[in-house]
Image (cartoon, rainbow, N blue to C red):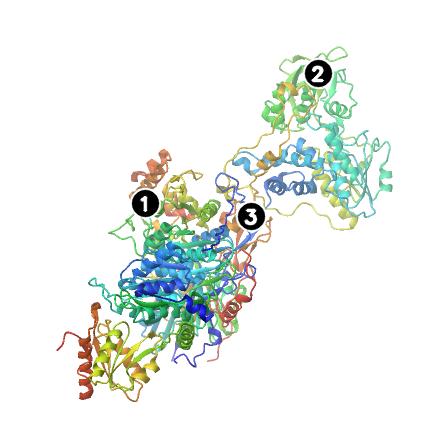
């Protein structure tokens, strides 16, 4: 039986929606494919503070997810870092079983980033994608009027922008789906708002193969 | 009992009722480092202020203004003395390129840097012992030929480096251009005398009345000294090559001033005096002429208007206040008179090229004018007298040939000052000569110690753009003006025209400094940091520390840095510096147990002194 | 020493409110937080006068609400001051938010309660519901049945609550009017005795700039259980302290109370009343009258309800055939559809091998006095049940049934 | 009864406030009552205020923190950044808990139970606590004149709970409890409660002042004046909330200046001796409110008419302070001279400036 945990690390407030979009779209796609899936946000310390590291979780399984109420992913197979600097400061690799995938939003090459990864031996691949560039991301401070309320709501309750992945989430989703196949490309593609960045990312991934796990 | 047999595991031990002992000031709150919230790290990187950059000898102007502002005058004086041997002189005579470059000039008015420098120079003069000490003797002897600004500067720096320095001066008194080129009412003789005394106090031997080529030869210098600095200056006045220039009553600017300065002048001026030339020396001559008894002084320049004159605007202004007339667009083509000058023949003329030593086009088609005078002072520049110099080191311009380190070929001879700078595009100004002497001294030292030479090629980031600073911190404030003697009284005396700053004025003016690109310990970052993770033990420039374990990268400090010395660097550019944590909560097992223990021992801890 | 002490004792005729005020004065409290509500307010009036007269040096604060009274007390106690406050009825409820924070931060604030029925409608009479509704908030709590006992309980409560093994706030309750407003003889001790009995308050970690600490930082979910466990443990460990303090009190002042229950004519009793508060006074007379008629009736009066003396209650009540719980409080929709004491009694008895029949009486509601004949009626109901071997119903509304 | 006279501290007033002088700050005390290691947002305005306030107060200080960001985010997970005694209290207990601490020290010092100079007792209440739920308790403490300083760090909303409207939220401010929509295009429809004036008017014996993090020395001096005042003092400090206002983190101090320069946060002091307002504080310049609004996402939805309404409000504030209005500001109160916040050009311009 296949069971995959995906943990997205992102920064509070300023990149909250991006992280939320990734777990929501992947779990929704998995449901469409008939799998069991769950997406949720970090609750326990609810770190909805600007720049604070926060996590979003996604679980995809062939069978019923029994640990539905466990509030964090204890063994993430896939880890996504929505902001590249997070590679330095956090033990995002904790609990990762061998054969994992790490996806980082950065303009650096994997060869540079690998030095910061704790426990890289557990990785099957390190994927770097310059999502900010591909999505022409201007961070928080343009479109203030549109984004104002979206940013206030870490729970997503007051989110006004209903588009999924209009921004840097799109290339990151492309990277996750292409390198891990956690869901099918054709199920997830239609829900992505920023199709251009999504497609560009498929061609512009920097994948560093590491230690594959013998099946 | 329901709580019987329960046990709180060690890693979950919490202090009594959650009461948490306060972090100590020294240790900080070490349980929850937040450095990994940061994507951009603030870094202190001082840039070069434009004043420092523009100064001929790169005085650390921002540095001493800052010290003056804080009342640390002696420190400020010591700082200025690193680059400038005689701030009391430059504080009076400098053409202050620093003030032209001053960023404050784009905002309201430039800082009156020269006046502050003079304040410090006078302070230094009043000291019983100078703050500067001679270096540890290294047993090497150096001769410095000429005691003008460049020679003075080179000798001073070499003495500080431990050399046994001998100055050879052609005149009976040391001082060179400082003495012979600058009138008393700008630079009183006693000020210069004191600065020369300071050289003697540094152990420098001054030999007056020793002229190279006459009293010593090139070979003597080579034989008797380990190295030699040639700072002989430009001693010979240029003529305008006009007919009858040899008549009585025709004077030349530099010898005119020099003789007065040395006290050997026998000149008696008539009532009407003309000065030929539009530079600073010409202005000094014109003003000196008034003081020497002239009634009507006219300055005749080729330049078509005052703005084009290669002179300091303030000096020009002060001259006009004293009643000197200007006659523009004329060249003197002949001196008329029977053995003695009676009148000048003037033709209209213009410069054919840029200002300074460019060919002059005289319009001979227009009839000449006759201009009646009793004396004429020709002040159109000087040239060097280099008969004693081996030909291989002479240039076509009549200056000394040096390499980019100031060295003559592969000899241990160096040359500095006007004698190398003439025609190089560098204005022939005291401060530039001082800078030249300083740099040559350092290179000489390197040669003798066998170290590689350095030119000033280090790339410097000079702040010219006000947007790189936070201008909201700078209210508009007018420049503090130096008092002047009233024109009517000053034109007859040798008293100093420009008056010194009082202490209060100096502090006031120094406080206007933007401190462009340079930390001046204003405490702003320290105060606005929300963490607060900017710390300092003592308040001093460059001694702030950012605790990278805690900085969240909000960049408020960068935004609020008035001087622009803080900048943001992407965190990923650093290989190190971010704390790694086991959990997102920053709570490792047992940390609170330790806290609980601390709380239990609170009573045993010495009480905080409040 | 003893002779001197005797000499300075004096007996005065005061009501429960003034007795409480006197206790605060003898305890040399530092901060008093007052807000008017009847009937407790007479205590604060008495204290105000003492402060005005210079008999007591304390900060007397006229608060802007009961919530503020409790917050002021919390703040003052956190700073290391001995605090006295109090309330009645809906006032007790208005301050509800603060009960858990105060006990959670382990601040031995003392609160005097003169019970009053909760609204609606406005009713000055005494019901225990006001204080009882806060019984699980971590406060030590017990009822007095006369002014002397009220005085003594206040002194003992300070001593217990401030004990470093306990550090918990205390609610010292008395019935409105029945205790608070009826004067009786109260023996006031010699200050020297109080000094001997009650050392100055010293919190181990007060808000002191010389030894800075932070009170009450935010915690993670996993840090909750250890803190709650510690608070529960303090409540349990207070039981030993309570017993010890009652002993010492008896040695110094000469009045001995059972810390948990007062037993009256229970030696051979078959049916007993189980109750707390002032109505026990009437109950004692009723029991005597019924004893005269040969009925084996007794009284078990609960003196301390928090911490609840489960084992003691179990042991005593197991001796009887029928237990009649006199509630004097509202437990709407509760276990017995009556008051809340029923459940407290039954729960203690559950583990007993010999369980008596338990019946609940809604008596003294609204502050109405429970008169002798009502005790007779209730006794009759208990005897009926004893004969029948089972109770007629769990709760009787006394005065509304035949 | 023999009592001990209570000794009070007298903190020196710092000279050279940023107003009208050079940017070089006066020498500040070296003690750090507030150290790093807490969970507030990057660029947190209230935290900046906390830093300045505690710096001004020094070590002999007790801080009281009613529920809010400065409690939850600062003393998280049983960590504390407070190097002086600090206590959490309930959000409605700001004034009363503080009063308790003050009363305790009065009594304990007087009765010889605590030796030393009376500590600075400072309550740091958010605007939710100060203007809504704890209003009565603060009023009570001020009225009773306990020797303490109650600070309202005014970030104009309940930020800790995820940005909800408080009675200090300005007109037009978007929060999760006052979102804009077709029926309420301006989001918050009410103007904020004039809390500080309420406090001055109702408790005229107290020192009351408004301050802003944009003027640190002025803020620190007002803190000291409040502490030196024997009796209760109330200070309302504008502290921009990075999260709730939606602006770029480095702008915290900048907004603190802009809000004053735009007339939306009048700076004044209430003098309890003369019973009069002191309006002598003047910002370096006066600006239209749109310059303040356009930096913040919470105002991004406003239309010209709403901005004009805010300008009118600001103009009234200027007039109240006796300031003569320049023509430009009078013009700016007319909607036809303004553009909508959400307009593309405006947004583009904002993107350029930050």
Q: Secondary structure at mark 1?
A: loop
Local crowd at mark 2 within 10 Å, few (<14), some, or many (≥20)? Answer: some
Q: Which mark is residue D340?
A: 1
Residue placed most toward the observer, D331 or A35: D331
Q: Please, which chain is the residue tagged with disc 3 on?
A: B
Question: Against A53, is C364 above or below?
Answer: below
> In which quadrant of the rendered view does residue C67 lie?
bottom left
Q: Residue C6 lies in what quarter of the image? A: bottom left
Image quadrant occupied by the C terminus of chain C: bottom left
Q: Within 10 Å of the Cα at label 1, are there few (<14), some (14-19), or many (20+) other Cα atoms?
A: some
Can you identify the residue that label 2 sits on? B293
In front of the other: B144 or C48: C48
Instruction: Say left or right for C283 vs B253.
Output: left
Q: Position of residue D292 (x, y in %)?
A: 39, 45
Report if the CB atoms under discs 3 and 1 are less than 8 Å apart: no
Mark closer to the observer (1, 2):
2
Q: Which residue is mark 3?
A: B565
Q: Quadrant of residue D291?
A: top left
Task: Give how far across and how far down residue B501 sits, in percent.
Answer: 62, 32
Instruction: Tell me residue B444's x, y (percent).
Output: 76, 45
Q: Secondary structure at mark 2?
A: loop
How far separated are the C-alphas under marks 1 and 2? 75 Å
- Residue C337 visible? The answer is no
Whether tag 3 and tag 2 are in contact, CB under 8 A, the answer is no
* Residue toward you, A43 or A40: A43
Q: Is residue A146 visible?
A: yes
Distance between the Cα atoms at labels 3 and 2?
54 Å
Pointer 3 local density, CA inside 10 Å: few below 14, some 14–19, many at least 20: many
| A201 lies above or below D119 | below
């Amino acid at each position: 039986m296949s069971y995959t945990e995906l943990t997205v690390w992102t920064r509070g407030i300023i990149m909250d929606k991006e992280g939320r979009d990734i777990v929501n779209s992947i779990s929704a796609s998995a449901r469409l494919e008939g799998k069991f899936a769950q997406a949720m946000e970090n609750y326990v310390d609810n770190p909805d503070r600007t720049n604070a590291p926060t996590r979003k979780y996604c679980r995809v399984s062939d069978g019923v997810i029994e640990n539905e109420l466990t509030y964090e992913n204890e063994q993430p197979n896939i880890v996504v870092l929505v902001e590249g600097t997070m590679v330095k400061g956090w033990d995002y690799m904790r609990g990762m079983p061998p054969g994992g995938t790490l996806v980082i939003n950065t303009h650096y090459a994997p060869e540079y980033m690998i030095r910061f990864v704790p426990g890289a031996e557990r990785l099957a691949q390190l994927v770097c994608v310059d999502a900010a560039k591909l999505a022409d991301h201007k961070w928080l401070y343009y479109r203030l009027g549109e984004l104002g309320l979206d940013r206030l709501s870490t729970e997503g309750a007051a989110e006004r922008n209903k588009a999924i992945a209009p921004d840097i989430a799109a290339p990151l989703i492309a990277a996750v789906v292409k390198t891990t196949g956690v869901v099918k490309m054709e199920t997830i593609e239609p829900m992505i708002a920023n199709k251009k960045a999504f497609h560009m990312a498929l061609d512009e991934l920097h994948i560093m193969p590491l230690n594959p796990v013998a099946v | 009992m329901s709580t019987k047999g329960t046990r709180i595991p060690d890693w979950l031990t919490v202090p009594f009722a959650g009461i948490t002992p306060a972090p100590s000031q020294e240790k900080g709150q070490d349980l929850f480092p937040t450095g990994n919230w940061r994507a951009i790290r603030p870094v202190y990187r001082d840039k070069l202020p434009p004043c420092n950059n523009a100064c001929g000898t790169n005085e650390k102007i921002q540095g001493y203004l800052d010290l003056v502002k804080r009342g640390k005058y002696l420190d400020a004086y010591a700082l200025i003395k690193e680059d400038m041997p005689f701030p009391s002189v430059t504080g009076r005579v400098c053409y202050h390129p620093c003030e032209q470059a001053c960023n404050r000039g784009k905002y309201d008015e430039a800082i009156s840097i020269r006046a502050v420098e003079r304040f410090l120079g006078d302070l230094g003069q009043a000291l019983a012992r100078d703050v500067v000490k001679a270096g540890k003797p290294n047993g090497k002897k150096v001769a410095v030929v000429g005691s003008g600004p460049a020679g003075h500067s080179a000798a001073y720096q070499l003495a500080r480096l431990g050399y046994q320095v001998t100055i050879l001066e052609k005149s009976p008194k040391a001082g060179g251009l400082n003495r012979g080129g600058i009138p008393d009412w700008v630079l009183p003789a006693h000020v210069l005398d004191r600065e020369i005394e300071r050289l003697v106090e540094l152990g420098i031997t001054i030999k007056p009345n020793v002229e190279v080529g006459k009293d010593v030869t090139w070979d003597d210098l080579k034989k008797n000294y380990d190295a030699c600095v040639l700072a002989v200056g430009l001693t010979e006045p240029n003529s305008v090559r006009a007919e009858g220039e040899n008549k009585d009553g025709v004077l030349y600017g530099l010898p005119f001033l020099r003789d007065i300065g040395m006290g050997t002048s026998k000149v008696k001026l008539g009532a009407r005096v003309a000065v030929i030339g539009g530079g600073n020396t010409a202005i000094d001559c014109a003003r000196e002429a008034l003081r020497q008894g002239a009634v009507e002084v006219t300055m005749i320049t080729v330049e078509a208007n005052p703005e084009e004159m290669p002179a300091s605007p303030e000096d020009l202004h002060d001259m006009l206040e004293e009643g000197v007339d200007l006659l523009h667009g004329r060249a003197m083509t002949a001196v008329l008179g029977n053995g003695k000058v009676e009148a000048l023949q003037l033709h209209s003329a213009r410069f054919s090229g840029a200002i300074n030593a460019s060919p002059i086009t005289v319009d001979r088609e227009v009839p000449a004018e006759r201009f009646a005078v009793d004396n004429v002072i020709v002040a159109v520049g000087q040239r060097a007298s280099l008969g004693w110099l081996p030909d291989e080191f002479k240039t076509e311009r009549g200056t000394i040939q040096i390499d980019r380190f100031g060295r003559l070929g592969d000899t241990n001879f160096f040359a500095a000052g006007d004698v190398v700078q003439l025609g190089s595009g560098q204005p022939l100004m005291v401060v530039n000569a001082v800078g030249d002497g300083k740099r040559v001294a350092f290179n000489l030292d390197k040669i003798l110690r066998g170290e590689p030479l350095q030119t000033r090629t280090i790339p410097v980031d000079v702040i010219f753009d006000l947007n790189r600073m936070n201008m909201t911190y700078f209210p508009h404030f007018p420049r503090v003006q130096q008092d002047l003697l009233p024109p009517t009284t000053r034109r007859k005396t040798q008293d100093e025209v420009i008056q010194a700053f009082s202490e209060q004025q100096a502090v006031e003016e120094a406080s206007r400094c933007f401190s462009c690109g340079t930390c001046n310990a204003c405490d702003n970052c320290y105060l606005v940091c929300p963490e607060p993770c900017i710390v300092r033990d003592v308040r001093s420039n460059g001694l702030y520390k950012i605790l990278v374990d805690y900085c969240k990268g909000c960049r408020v400090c960068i935004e609020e840095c008035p001087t622009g010395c803080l900048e943001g660097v992407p965190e990923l550019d650093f290989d190190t510096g971010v704390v790694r944590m086991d959990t997102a909560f920053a709570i490792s097992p047992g940390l609170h147990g330790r806290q609980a223990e601390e709380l239990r021992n609170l009573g045993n801890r010495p009480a905080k002194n409040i | 020493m003893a002779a001197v002490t005797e000499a300075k004792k004096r007996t005065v005729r005061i009501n429960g409110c003034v007795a409480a005020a006197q206790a605060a004065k003898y305890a040399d409290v530092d901060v008093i937080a007052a807000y008017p509500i009847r009937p407790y307010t007479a205590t604060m009036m008495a204290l105000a006068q003492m402060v005005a007269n210079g008999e007591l040096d304390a900060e007397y604060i006229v608060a802007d609400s009961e919530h503020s009274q409790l917050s002021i007390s919390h703040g003052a106690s956190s700073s290391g001051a001995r605090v006295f406050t109090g309330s009645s009825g809906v006032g007790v409820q208005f301050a509800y938010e603060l009960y858990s924070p105060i006990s959670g931060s382990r601040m031995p604030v003392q609160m005097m309660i003169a019970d009053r029925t909760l609204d609606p409608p406005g009713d000055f009479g005494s019901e225990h519901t006001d204080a009882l509704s806060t019984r699980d908030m971590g406060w030590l709590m017990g009822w007095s049945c006369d002014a002397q006992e009220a005085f003594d309980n206040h002194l003992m409560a300070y001593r217990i609550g401030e004990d470093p093994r306990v550090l918990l706030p205390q609610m010292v309750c008395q019935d409105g009017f029945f205790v608070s407003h009826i004067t009786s003889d109260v023996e006031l001790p010699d200050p020297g005795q109080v000094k001997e009995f009650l050392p100055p308050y010293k919190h181990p970690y007060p808000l002191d700039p010389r030894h800075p600490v932070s009170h009450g930082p935010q915690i993670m979910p996993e840090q909750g259980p250890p803190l709650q466990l510690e608070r529960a443990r303090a409540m349990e460990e207070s039981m030993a302290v309570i017993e010890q303090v009652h002993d010492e009190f008896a040695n110094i002042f000469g009045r001995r109370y059972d810390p948990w229950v007062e037993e009256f004519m229970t030696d051979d009793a078959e049916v007993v009343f189980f109750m707390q508060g002032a109505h026990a006074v009437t109950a004692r007379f009723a029991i005597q009258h019924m004893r005269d008629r040969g009925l084996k009736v007794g009284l078990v009066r609960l003196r301390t309800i928090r911490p609840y003396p489960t084992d003691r209650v179990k042991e005593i009540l197991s001796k009887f055939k029928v237990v009649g719980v006199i509630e004097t409080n509202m437990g709407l929709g509760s276990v017995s559809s009556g008051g809340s004491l029923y459940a407290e009694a039954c729960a203690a008895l559950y583990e007993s091998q010999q369980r008596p029949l338990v019946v609940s009486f809604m008596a003294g509601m609204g502050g109405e006095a429970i008169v002798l004949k009502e005790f007779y009626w209730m006794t009759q109901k208990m005897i009926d049940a004893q004969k029948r071997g089972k109770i007629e119903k769990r709760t009787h509304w006394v005065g509304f049934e035949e | 009864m023999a009592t001990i006279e209570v000794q009070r501290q007298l903190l020196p007033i710092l000279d050279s406030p940023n107003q009208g002088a050079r940017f070089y700050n006066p020498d500040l005390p070296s003690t750090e009552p507030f150290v790093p290691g807490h969970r507030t947002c990057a660029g947190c305005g209230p935290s900046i205020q906390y830093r300045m306030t505690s710096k001004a107060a020094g070590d002999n200080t007790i801080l009281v923190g009613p529920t809010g960001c400065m409690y939850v985010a600062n003393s998280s997970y049983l960590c504390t950044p407070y190097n002086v005694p600090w206590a959490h209290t309930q959000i409605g207990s700001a004034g009363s808990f503080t009063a308790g601490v003050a009363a305790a020290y009065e009594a304990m010092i007087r009765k010889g139970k605590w030796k030393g100079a009376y500590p600075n007792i400072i309550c740091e209440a958010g605007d939710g606590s100060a203007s809504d739920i704890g209003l009565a308790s603060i009023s009570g403490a001020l009225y009773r004149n306990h020797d303490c300083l109650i600070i309202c760090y005014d970030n104009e909303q309940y930020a800790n709970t995820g940005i909800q409207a408080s009675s200090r939220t300005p007109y037009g401010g978007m929060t999760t409890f006052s979102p804009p929509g077709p029926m309420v295009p301006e989001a918050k429809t009410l103007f904020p409660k004039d809390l500080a004036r309420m406090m001055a008017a109702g408790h005229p014996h107290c020192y009351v002042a408004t301050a802003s993090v944009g003027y640190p020395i002025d803020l620190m001096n007002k803190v000291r004046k409040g502490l030196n005042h024997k009796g209760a003092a109330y200070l309302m400090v504008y502290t921009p909330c990075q999260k709730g206002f939606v602006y770029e983190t480095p702008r915290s101090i900048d907004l603190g200046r802009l809000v004053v320069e735009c007339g939306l946060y009048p700076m004044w002091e209430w003098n309890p001796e003369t019973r009069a307002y002191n309006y002598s504080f003047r910002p370096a310049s006066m600006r239209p409110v749109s310059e303040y609004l356009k930096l913040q996402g919470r105002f991004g939805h406003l239309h010209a008419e709403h901005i004009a309404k805010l300008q009118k409000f600001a103009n009234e504030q200027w007039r109240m302070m006796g300031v003569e209005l320049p023509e430009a500001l009078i013009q700016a109160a007319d909607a036809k001279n303004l553009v909508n916040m959400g307009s593309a050009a405006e947004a583009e311009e904002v993107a350029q400036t930050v």
